[in-house]
Image: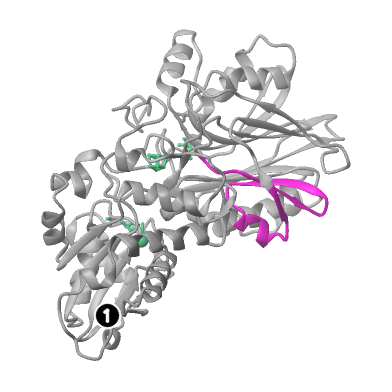
Amino acid sequence: MIDKPRDYCGIFGIQNHPDAALLSYYGLHSLQHRGQESAGIITSHYDDEKSRWVMPAHRDFGLVLNIFDDPKIFENELKGRAAIGHNRYSTTGAAKNPANIQPFRVHYHEGNIAIGHNGNLANAKQLRDRFREEGVLFQSTSDTELILHLISHSQKDTQIEQVLDALEQIEGAYSLVMLTDDKLIAVRDPNGFRPLALGKVDGSYCVSSETCAFDIIDAEYVRDIKPGEVLVLDQDAGSDAEPVSYQLEPEHGTGTSQCIFEYVYFSRPDSKIFGENVDKVRRNLGKYLAKEHPVNEIIQKDTGDTKPIVISVPDSSNTAALGYVHENQKFGNECKYEIGLIRNHYVGRTFISPGQKSREQKVRTKFNTVKGVIEGRSVIIVDDSIVRGTTSRYLVNMIRQANPAEVHFLVSSPPIISPCYYGMDFPTPKELMANRFDRDIDAMAKEIGVDSLRYLSADGLVNSVKEANLSGDDYCTACFTENYPVPVNFGVEKEENEIV
Ligand SMILES: O=P(O)(O)OC[C@H]1O[C@H](OP(=O)(O)OP(=O)(O)O)[C@H](O)[C@@H]1O
Ligand SMILES: NC(=O)CC[C@H](N)C(=O)O
Ligand code: SF4
Ligand SMILES: [Mg+2]
């Protein structure tokens, strides 16, 4: 059972750099929040002794810091001027199956090829069924492997044509980094579900899910990989010639549908995604939250001279809470941003917590209240999302123990009513709090123990994002609205292809 929605994967790639693997390591380290089940790096180089191209790989379960804890991995194993890396949170194929750790690498009639994928293929079931009929023996249970089969089965003449042919047959969400013997290929699906940015370091091109990976290696942001773009970086990419790029057409007559939840919760606030700073967009979510639910409409008790306090649930809602307070203050609604919750940063998101009692323990292990800040005050908690309601219920309980005058809860996104099929691991619909209480807000407020509960509206969410990101691109909002931009196979289980 999934405790809450988990992050997408993080991908990184770099071409023609003497420290390709090491820079990939730093890149993956800064993308750690996007996937914490497993990680890996693959490089490519021509081995003079063997007189052939080789693709060394280093992959394992766990966190980047632990997997790559031996400098010899970079000195002796991961040689080469091109590399790709991946942090995984599984969406298709069991997390615990070692065969599903990415990047994947295979050898086929055109040489070696490796792939790292962020997203989830909407037609994975049909493709797997087709290949099964054809007698293909699968190496993993992940959707990502299907892309490699499509490439090797393609009847096209050149490798790039084979890749394009394969990409035209997949649907859904995919940001990809691919490594061939001499090329790095970066791809974003035509709907642009997942982010992918192009950067440059020491004259060499690199790509990353989020730009925070560029900052850590001192790379500059060049631009986003465009929705539907297939960018080919060969060994002299970075010199004067512009890299070659191809364009895939969207399926089903759809336009762009970038994942709006990236702005709400997943991406780091110091990143730029979809061409705009996450910090800026998240502050705007707070601003719209203030427009829809100003402080003076929430507070019910008179606490004398002490202003109502607004506290965030660190770290992911800090920025939205700041935007909320700023907008309220602009309109003379008295309130103060306070740090009322302290987070212990040494608790991983993968903390094992079977059963209700230990779930409470998990929240207690992660957060503590600053009692002097909360006591006697009207408290407004701002969080980015409520999924199962576990975090909010236990947090409110802890906050109540610090004796506030009243407690209200604000969410900088609408109620989550439906799972994601585009690369985020969600609980089932009946586990989502909004569904458990038939979307009755008062009943949900009672469940989490607050005096009132308020959400940003779906229109407010889209409008605030579009006001901050002027690109004109559209967004996927399916987990809030059930409007799935690309048809999906509902009911396909993540682990249905496992052998054990
Ligand atoms: O309603 P729930 O099922 O409890 O899920 C909602 C919580 O999950 C996320 O935080 P999470 O603790 O996963 O990670 P974070 O520390 O990055 O915010 C999100 O920011 C909410 O706080
Ligand atoms: N979260 C993701 O992007 C997952 C990628 C891929 N579908 C997998 O399960 O490995
Ligand atoms: S369903 Fe939600 S999480 Fe999934 S891509 Fe759409 S907006 Fe993002
Ligand atoms: Mg949180």
Quarter holding the C terminus? top left
Q: Position of residue 178 (x, y in %)?
A: 65, 34
Q: Nearer the viewer, residue 440 or 267?
A: 440
Q: Residue furthest front?
A: 331
Where is residue 294, by image quadrant? bottom left
Q: Which residue occupies 43% across, 53% down?
A: 464
Q: Position of residue 22 (x, y in %)?
A: 71, 54
Q: How many marks?
A: 1
- Residue position for label 1: 308
The answer to whether residue 220 is left or right of residue 1 is right
The answer to whether residue 84 is left or right of residue 147 is right
The answer to whether residue 111 is left or right of residue 210 is right
489 falls in the magenta region: no
Where is residue 490, by image quadrant? top left
Where is residue 169, by image quadrant? top right
The answer to whether residue 329 is left or right of residue 438 is right
Question: Label 1 amino acid?
Answer: Pro
Q: What SS does tag 1 mark?
A: loop
Q: Which residue occupies 44% across, 66% down?
A: 319
Q: Is residue 163 above or below residue 118?
A: above
Residue 347 visible in this rendered orientation of the protein: no
Q: Is residue 152 above or below residue 83?
A: above
Q: Which residues are magenta?
A: 194-222
Residue 246 visible in this rendered orientation of the protein: yes
Q: Position of residue 479 (x, y in %)?
A: 33, 41
Q: Residues within 10 Å of mark 1 (few under 14, many from 20)?
A: many
Q: Position of residue 454 (x, y in %)?
A: 23, 59
